[in-house]
């Protein structure tokens, strides 16, 4: 009888005998089974989830920690004013007294800002927006949009109920300065099928941009605002609208006329020859314009006079009503303007020098590499200095102590190398590297920065200090009477903690071996099996706020600005930390 060989047959696994009658091929060896990248990914994910479950289960039996972490992926912290939880880069949640912020793979998946009256979700780079809003009268209002596919609104008030589905159409209410807009049939998207791009390279072209614009233009539209009603065919080409005071008609590009009683009367022919009249109580302003060659503007009283050649390159004029004088020769290279109401001064000689002052705001630039912005308010003064967007320096000074910034706060960054932040309350932080071109410590930085942090250091006002090395492969935190460290090269290889001159925990190789000194006893672990070797310590509370149990805690998370609703949209304005606090005396930001 032949021996059965260890080959793989349909319905049979490796290392199982083949059915009777099946013989081993001569000199054939069983093939080695190889793993796939997806298999490795799911295995790693399962190990990580198991570790989180294991660590959370172990902590539940003891007192919940104020701060805990695992490598660069997991962090949980609870402070007197806020709580934070993050599994990088998949989920982040910060909870404050007045609301919360959540995010996942921001700005791709979603980010959410929730307060007492607003609950807003955004995602897909801002293309998706969902907003629950509670009005002051107690009425709930919901708006959802996924541009340009769906726009939906719901409320107990019928004026806020609407639905538009592209490319069929529908109605939108309370948007774009109109009470109601209805648009139907968007055929422009068919151009992508009639004239498909030849390749992916030609897809990103001017032709594609034109097709996109045509795809969001409706065949038929109506809109209403108070007693004004209008309809349009192939908007914006053909339109007719009227009310008791307004009358509008256009067939572009041939002719257009817009009139509003006691306000304006405008004509356009071939979109080149334009006449406009604006009516005031004691005057009338007339503009004639042959675009873009020549134009002139004057008032019946003679207080206004302006002219332009090859607009917008050359223009000059005055307005005696506002004490306004302006010269552009040519724009934007030379711009000169003075005005009394509103108070305005402008001197621009681009790109060498520019100065602009509007009421209480000033902007100065010397070459594109230096900017200085200044603002004066009744409650604060602010200054921003910018050099090449590489070196940044922010500074704030407050009249009374702020819960986060104290009375004096500084932030310095050389992008993308490092950043330093400190205040007079004793808080201090340093990070190397610092790749994000913005400052957002509770959003983007908290979600992503540990992935490229070569070295980080943080000191809290309570005296606790923290150090992380190589993306937190090694991380430690310590204070006056406690010390905790973890060495986690992929798996928890070694961790140690002590407090009040007592060793509290030692863990080796995923807690396969270890020692723990807790309230319920002292234990050693051998192959994850705990063996009690004595009674635990019950001591006075340590400076970190814990009883004698080993200390992994720290009430250290500091909340955002009081009363300020954080906006985490990916925008360059995030570079400038907002200075709208009434207690601020002076904010000075320098970006080099």
Image: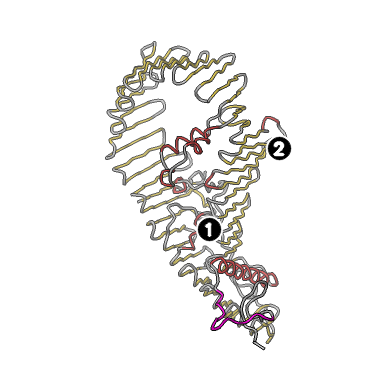
Q: Check residue 32 for magenta coloring.
A: yes
Residue 558 in sight from this viewpoint: yes
Question: Horizontal placement of 330 versus 103: left or right?
Answer: left
Which is in the foreground here, disc 2 or disc 1?
1
Count numbered badges in the picture: 2
Q: Looking at the picture, how far across and down is residue 485, in whole percent?
A: 53, 74
- Magenta-drawn segment: 20-33
* Closer-to-camera residue (189/173): 189
* Closer-to-camera residue (474/117): 474
Q: Looking at the picture, how far across and down is residue 66, in whole percent?
A: 61, 65
Determine whether 489 is above or below 384 in the image: below
Determine whether 181 is above or below 109 in the image: above
The N terminus sits in image quarter: bottom right
Q: Main secondary structure of the magenta part?
A: loop
Instruction: Kindly identify which residue carries mark 1.
Output: 447
Q: Looking at the picture, how far across and down is residue 157, in whole percent?
A: 71, 32
Q: Looking at the picture, how far across and down is residue 514, in whole percent?
A: 61, 82
Q: What residue is drawn where x is 47% and y is 35%?
A: 211
Instruction: Kindly identify which residue carries mark 2.
Output: 138
Q: Check residue 277 for magenta coloring.
A: no
In primary-sequence order, the first of circles 2 and 1 is 2
Instruction: State the residue lying farthest toward the right.
Output: 156
| Mark 2 Cα-neighbour bin, 10 Å: few <14, some 14–19, many ≥20 | few
Q: Residue 475: which disc?
A: none
Residue 585 in sight from this viewpoint: no
Check disc 1 and report its element: helix, strand or loop.
helix
| Marks 2/1: CA–CA distance | 35 Å
Question: Horizontal placement of 420 versus 65: left or right?
Answer: left
Q: What residue is drawn where x is 68% and y is 33%?
A: 161
Question: Horizontal placement of 445 versus 518: left or right?
Answer: left
| Mark 1 Cα-neighbour bin, 10 Å: few <14, some 14–19, many ≥20 | many
């Amino acid at each position: 009888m032949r021996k059965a060989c260890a080959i793989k047959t349909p319905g049979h696994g490796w290392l199982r005998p083949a059915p009777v009658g099946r013989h081993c091929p001569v000199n054939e060896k069983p093939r080695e089974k190889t793993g796939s990248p997806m298999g490795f990914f799911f295995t790693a994910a399962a190990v990580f989830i198991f570790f989180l479950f294991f660590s959370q289960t172990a902590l539940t039996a003891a007192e919940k920690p104020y701060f805990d972490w695992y490598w660069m992926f997991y962090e949980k912290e609870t402070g007197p004013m806020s709580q934070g939880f993050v599994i990088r880069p998949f989920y982040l949640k910060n909870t404050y007294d007045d609301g919360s912020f959540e995010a996942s793979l921001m700005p791709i998946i979603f980010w959410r800002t929730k307060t007492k009256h607003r609950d807003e979700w955004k995602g897909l780079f801002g293309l998706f927006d969902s907003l629950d809003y509670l009005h002051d009268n107690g009425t709930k209002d919901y708006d959802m949009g996924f541009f340009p596919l769906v726009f939906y609104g719901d409320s107990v008030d019928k004026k806020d109920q609407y639905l538009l589905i592209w490319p069929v159409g529908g109605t939108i209410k309370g948007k774009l300065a109109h009470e109601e807009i209805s648009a139907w049939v968007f055929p422009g998207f068919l151009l992508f099928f009639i004239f498909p791009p030849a390749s992916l390279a030609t897809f990103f072209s001017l032709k594609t941009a034109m097709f996109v614009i045509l795809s969001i233009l409706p065949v038929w539209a109506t809109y209403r605002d108070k007693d004004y009603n209008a309809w349009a065919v192939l908007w914006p080409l053909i339109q007719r609208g009227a009310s008791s005071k307004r009358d509008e008609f256009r067939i572009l590009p041939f002719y257009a006329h817009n009139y509003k009683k006691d306000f304006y009367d405008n004509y356009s022919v071939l979109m080149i020859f334009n006449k406009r009249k604006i009516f005031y109580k004691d005057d009338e302003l007339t503009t004639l314009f042959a675009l873009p060659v020549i134009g002139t503007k004057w008032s019946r009283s003679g207080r206004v006079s302006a002219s332009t050649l090859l607009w917008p390159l050359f223009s000059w004029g005055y307005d005696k009503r506002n004490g306004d004088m302006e010269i552009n020769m040519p724009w934007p290279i030379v711009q000169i303007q003075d005005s009394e109401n509103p108070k305005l001064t402008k001197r621009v000689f681009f790109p060498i020098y520019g100065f602009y002052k509007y009421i209480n705001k000033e902007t100065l630039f010397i070459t594109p590499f230096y900017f200085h912005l200044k603002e004066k308010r009744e409650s604060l003064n602010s200054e921003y200095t910018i050099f090449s967007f590489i070196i940044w320096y922010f500074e704030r000074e407050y009249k009374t102590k702020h819960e986060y910034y104290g009375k004096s706060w500084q932030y310095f960054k050389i992008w993308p190398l490092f950043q330093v932040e400190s205040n007079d309350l004793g808080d201090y932080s340093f990070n190397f590297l610092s790749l994000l071109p913005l400052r957002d410590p509770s959003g983007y930085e908290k979600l992503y920065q540990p992935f490229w942090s070569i070295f980080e250091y943080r000191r809290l006002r309570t005296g606790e200090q923290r150090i992380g090395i190589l993306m937190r492969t090694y991380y430690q935190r310590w204070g006056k009477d406690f010390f905790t460290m973890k060495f986690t090269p992929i798996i928890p290889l070694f961790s140690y903690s002590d407090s009040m001159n007592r060793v509290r925990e030692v863990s080796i190789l995923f807690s396969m071996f270890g020692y723990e000194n807790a309230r319920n006893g002292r234990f050693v672990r051998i192959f994850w099996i705990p063996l009690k070797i004595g009674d635990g310590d019950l001591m006075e509370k340590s400076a970190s706020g814990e009883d004698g149990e080993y200390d992994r805690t720290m009430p250290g998370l500091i909340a955002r600005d009081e009363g300020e609703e954080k906006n985490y949209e990916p925008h360059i304005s995030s570079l400038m930390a907002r200075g709208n606090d009434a207690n601020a005396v002076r904010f000075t930001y320098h970006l080099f």
